């Protein structure tokens, strides 16, 4: 749900950026800088708190990437606010918005690929040749076929195969 929300936000940002590119608006750079700074501090705190666990859980990774994209957005808005304040470069606002939206789409797309793989219980990314060799090296195993693997989360892989055994006394 978080990833889909991020994609929705990115699409909205693109429409807003195009709209502001066509008809630039007056921007209060002071307010922009203050809000961006507050957002940067809050998002950085969240990023630091979630970073360690983001490698173990897609749910935490999704939240982490959301906060990371917000942090990058805050930096972009700060830089844009400075450019508007000192050089009156109003076109930088929709440019930064568009860049942030593209970044969100790329990061979210990568994560959605992993999420869909788990939801569809796709085959695990394993070295099947090595797996076959290791199983065939076990005493009394004659053959192996009909191998299936699937993932039910980012850590659990299920394995199923037909194993032909030698007649054992």
Image: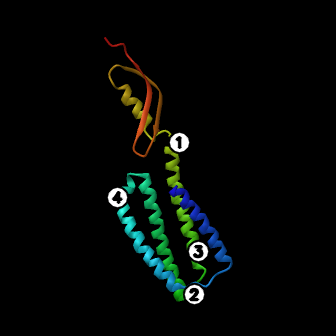
Viewer-side label of 1, 3: 1
- Mark 3 residue element: helix
> Looking at the image, which residue is at 43% across and 74% down?
40
- Mark 1 residue element: loop
Q: CA distance from mark 2 to mark 4?
A: 40 Å
> Looking at the image, which residue is at 32% across and 22% down?
139
Image quarter where the C terminus lies is: top left
Q: Which residue is mark 3?
A: 95
Q: Is residue 1 above or below residue 132?
A: below
Q: Is residue 152 above or below residue 160?
A: below
Q: Reading the chain from its start, which is encountered first: label 1 or label 3?
A: 3
Q: Residues within 10 Å of mark 2 (few under 14, many from 20)?
A: some
Viewer-side label of 2, 4: 4
Q: Reading the chain from its start, which is encountered first: label 2 or label 4?
A: 4
Q: Which residue is mark 1?
A: 120
Q: Residues within 10 Å of mark 3 (few under 14, many from 20)?
A: some
Outermost residue, front side:
1
Q: Are marks 2 and 4 in contact (CB under 8 Å)?
A: no
Q: Reading the chain from its start, which is encountered first: label 1 or label 4?
A: 4
- Mark 2 residue element: loop
Q: CA distance from mark 1 to mark 4?
A: 27 Å
Q: Which residue is mark 2?
A: 88
Q: Which residue is mark 4?
A: 52
Mark number displayed over residue 8:
none
| Position in image of residue 80 (x %, y %) | 52, 79
Outermost residue, right side:
22
Q: CA distance from mark 4 to mark 3?
A: 32 Å
């Amino acid at each position: 749900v978080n990833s889909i929300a991020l994609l929705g936000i990115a699409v909205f940002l693109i429409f807003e950026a195009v709209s502001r590119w066509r008809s630039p608006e007056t921007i209060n750079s002071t307010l922009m800088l203050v809000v961006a700074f507050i957002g940067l501090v809050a998002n950085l705190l969240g990023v630091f708190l979630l970073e360690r666990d983001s490698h173990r859980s897609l749910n935490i990774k999704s939240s982490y990437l959301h906060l990371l994209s917000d942090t990058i957005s805050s930096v972009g808005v700060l830089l844009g606010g400075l450019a508007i304040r000192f050089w009156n470069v109003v076109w930088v606002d929709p440019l930064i918005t568009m860049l942030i939206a593209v970044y969100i789409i790329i990061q979210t797309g990568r994560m959605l690929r992993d999420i869909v793989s788990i939801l569809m219980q796709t085959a695990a990314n394993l070295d099947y040749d090595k797996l076959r060799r290791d199983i065939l090296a076990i005493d009394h195993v004659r053959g192996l076929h009909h191998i299936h693997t699937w993932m039910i989360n980012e850590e659990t892989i299920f394995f199923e195969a037909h194993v032909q055994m030698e007649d054992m006394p």
